[in-house]
Image (cartoon, coloured by chain):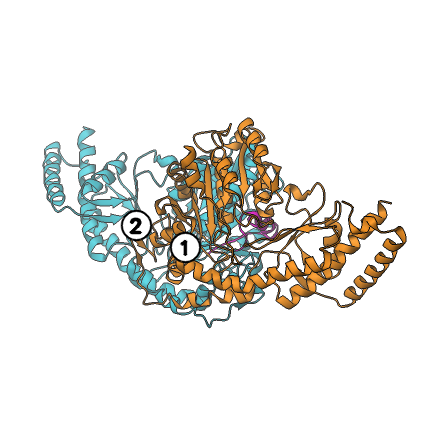
Chain colours: A orange, B cyan
């Protein structure tokens, strides 16, 4: 179906462009400085966790099961913190390591472990020629940057409304022993906000990789991050593995970066018992033992999954209006034109926007000119290369509602102008 | 000069052995369970830092210069924490990154960076054939384990009373482009407790490595850790570099693991501006930003170098009597026999003990049998291979004075027995 601009006469289109250029001139004159670039909680959100800072005092007992909080030891993390992490991910605490504040750092270190030391008794990846990671796209730029930094070839895989295209994934994973990993954000995916369907999770669990050292990097970053009334259900990947009679296939990650404090949460990893034994051995060389006061403070503050959910309800109350505003502004501004599409997530930190072919770079660039920083166009694709140049990641959580509203107004104008110019140029 | 046992007749020696074996039987019957294995502060020491836990509360301002404590950002660490770290190391804050709680983890990641990505525009080490690290021995087992884990060849270098044998170091570093690093603990070295002389530091600073991607891993772990009246002076390596007109040669590390809390201190790294730019780029992929509450708490607690020194004086008051006890017990028990030698450090966490050739493994093994755990014999050498089997690391800080006293009494008996048996076997 032709879109509204395609139906216009060239004269009408020229008039529209002139009118939109006038608007952008007005906007430029306002010298805005707004930021919709990164998935950062707002100050209002981080303030929710301030009470945590009162819970650790000089009188706090510093023993936690077999863990001594104020000395070396318990390299897997404090027992109570492992239980909390296990409850969040729905796995066994004995298979969980809690370490540091960054799950991205844990992912990096496990890619490094495959590259330098090898996984499952196989040669290190650096001795196996050109190895590959699959990158469902659009996806998370920092994931792709990790594998790329090792010289691993990042291969885009199409993302659908229920997860990656599993026919493509299966063919590559089962057919090519050079494929060693795949990056997944299975719930409220970055940036599309979709949650993998049970069918997709089962298809992952049933994979028979050509490479024994292939692992799924299951970054469950937004497992408790619904912001609406409906919370998507994600099938537990380890339950699906058991069902499929499969094993040693998944590294799952999580953190409280967006439950408590970004960059000062607690991060965790879980895998099969055999994989965990390997991970422990690798970590033993590179980490004496982890920071434990933060772990203890988190346990005292969040207590258990119910405590986490209570905390997340407070986040939702702050976040939901921002996503509603995105939906409303985009629908009002662009809904009937047929020139763009976007996702309607129930949780997470992003809305994924699809403009006309060849528009994304131009939109983000003009936005920047007008004082609104967005995630770089292409960032959601390996090597920053969005082949159709359509995808833009909208991160609405950090700005105030007022700033967000201004930024979205600008966005609507810019999308229209770029789309109209593209249509004009094609005639 | 022959030692006391060499001067004994075989009959006297047999009688001595019988008497010492009787003593060990008595000790065995006591079923001791003592630990002199690791360089861990005692509970009394870690209690010194408990007041730090009261300083962060929900009312604490969470802004630090251009850093927001409770959100992403300032990947180099909080400005105030970088200033504190810079003061401790005697360097410029702008060349310091404070990140995480483990300096060993920072060292690991920089070895990994050389191996995976390459340093100073050179090929990654994994593409350069068999590369090598120099390991002044006896040295720190965890250092050696890091380089070994990458398949790097660890080459022992003799340690003297004023540092590594710089003739050997110079020849290897300047003659062999496969030599990419050297592990150094320049002050109160692990385990000998010696401090590198000005001459040795200047010789390091004047190195002209054959490999442009050679770096000195300068682990200044005990920079403020004097426990006696005399604090060894260590020449500032960056001052020495400037004097020598040399650059891009040293990664220096430090942490507060033994100032505040082991495994929950703050860790830092400094290097030349060009090296720091490379380190920043590497860290940007693997770390979003660091845990910042711990950094802020450390700054509030320690304030500045004077505050650190105040805190270290309290540690010294607890640690000094333990080292005095080691010195007294070893002198009283072994001083006149000529069968053993040991170091007399002014700071740090260890005493390095040298028994007769071929004795160390037997001593540590018999100690374990008698219920006293020590660092594994050989651990202070690459691959656990002490070629003369003489070195034992004594870590006296963790046990109580009473337990330490018992452990040392056992140690004296065991050293005598093993030495006497060795002498007997040689006849």
- The quarter of the displayed image where residue A309 is located: bottom left
Res. A321 in view: yes
Residue placed most toward the observer, A299 or A337: A337
Q: Quadrant of the N terminus of chain B?
A: top left
Residue B91 is situated, as x and y percent measured from the top left of the image, at 53, 58
* Left or right, A381 with reference to A113: right
B278 part of magenta stretch: yes
Main secondary structure of the magenta stretch: helix
Whole-percent x and y of residue B295?
Answer: 47, 61
Q: Which residue is mark 1?
A: A291
Q: Residue furthest right?
A: A11
The answer to which of A113 and B97 lies nearer the viewer is A113
Q: Are marks 2 and 1 in contact (CB under 8 Å)?
A: no
State which chain disc 1 sits on. A
Location of residue B223 (image quadrant): bottom left
Image x and y of residue B247, in percent = 59, 49
**Viewer-proximal residue, B17 or A140?**
A140
Image quadrant occupied by the C terminus of chain B? top left
- Taking the view exactly as shown, the residue that stands out farthest to the bottom is B59
Few, some or many C-alpha atoms within 10 Å of disc 2 (few <14, some 14-19, many ≥20)?
A: many
Span colored in magenta? B267-289
Q: Secondary structure at mark 1?
A: loop
The x, y position of residue A87, in whole percent, is 39, 51
Q: Chain of mark 2?
A: B
- Circle 2 SS class: loop
Say if the magenta span includes residue A255.
Answer: no
Total of numbered circles in the picture?
A: 2
Q: Which residue is mark 2?
A: B395
Residue B99 in the image: above or below residue B19: below
What number is the disc on residue A248?
none
Judge whether residue B168 can be spotted in this image: no
- Left or right: residue A409 versus residue B305 is right
């Amino acid at each position: 179906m032709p879109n509204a601009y395609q139906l216009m006469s060239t004269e009408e289109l020229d008039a529209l462009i002139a009118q939109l250029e006038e608007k952008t001139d007005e906007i430029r004159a306002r010298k805005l400085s707004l930021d919709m670039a990164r998935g950062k909680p707002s100050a209002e959100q981080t303030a929710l966790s301030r009470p945590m800072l009162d819970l650790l005092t000089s009188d706090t007992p510093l023993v936690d099961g077999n863990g001594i909080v104020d000395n070396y030891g318990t390299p897997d993390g404090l027992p109570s913190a492992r239980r909390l992490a296990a409850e969040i991910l729905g796995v066994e605490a004995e298979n969980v390591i809690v370490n540091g504040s960054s799950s991205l750092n844990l992912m990096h270190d496990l890619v490094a472990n495959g590259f330098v030391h090898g996984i499952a008794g196989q040669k290190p990846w650096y001795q196996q020629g050109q190895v590959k990671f699959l990158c469902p796209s659009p996806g998370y730029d920092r994931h792709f940057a990790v594998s790329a930094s090792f010289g691993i070839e990042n291969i885009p895989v199409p993302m659908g409304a229920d997860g990656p295209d599993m026919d493509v994934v299966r063919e590559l994973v089962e057919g090519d022993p050079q494929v060693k990993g795949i990056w997944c954000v299975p719930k409220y995916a970055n940036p599309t906000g979709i949650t993998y369907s049970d069918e997709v999770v089962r298809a992952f669990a049933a994979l028979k990789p050509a490479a024994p050292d292939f692992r799924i990097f299951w970054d469950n970053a937004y497992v408790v991050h619904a912001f609406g009334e409906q919370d998507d259900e994600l099938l537990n990947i380890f339950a699906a593995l058991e069902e499929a009679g499969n094993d040693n296939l998944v590294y799952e990650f999580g953190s409280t970066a967006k439950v408590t404090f970004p960059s000062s949460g607690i991060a965790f990893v879980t895998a099969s018992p055999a994989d965990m034994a390997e991970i422990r051995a690798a970590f033993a060389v590179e980490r004496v033992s982890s920071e434990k006061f933060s772990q203890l403070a988190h346990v005292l503050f969040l207590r258990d999954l119910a405590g986490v959910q209570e905390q997340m309800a407070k986040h939702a109350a702050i976040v939901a209006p921002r996503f509603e505003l995105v939906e409303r502004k985009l629908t009002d501004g662009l809904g009937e034109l047929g020139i763009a599409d976007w996702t309607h997530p129930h949780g997470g930190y992003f809305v994924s926007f699809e403009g006309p072919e060849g528009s994304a770079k131009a939109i983000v660039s003009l936005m920047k000119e007008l004082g609104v920083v967005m995630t770089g166009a292409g960032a959601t694709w390996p090597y920053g290369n969005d082949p159709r140049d359509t995808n833009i990641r909208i991160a609405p959580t950090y700005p105030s509602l007022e700033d967000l509203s201004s930024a979205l107004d600008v966005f609507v104008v810019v999308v229209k102008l770029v789309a109209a110019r593209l249509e004009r140029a094609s005639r």
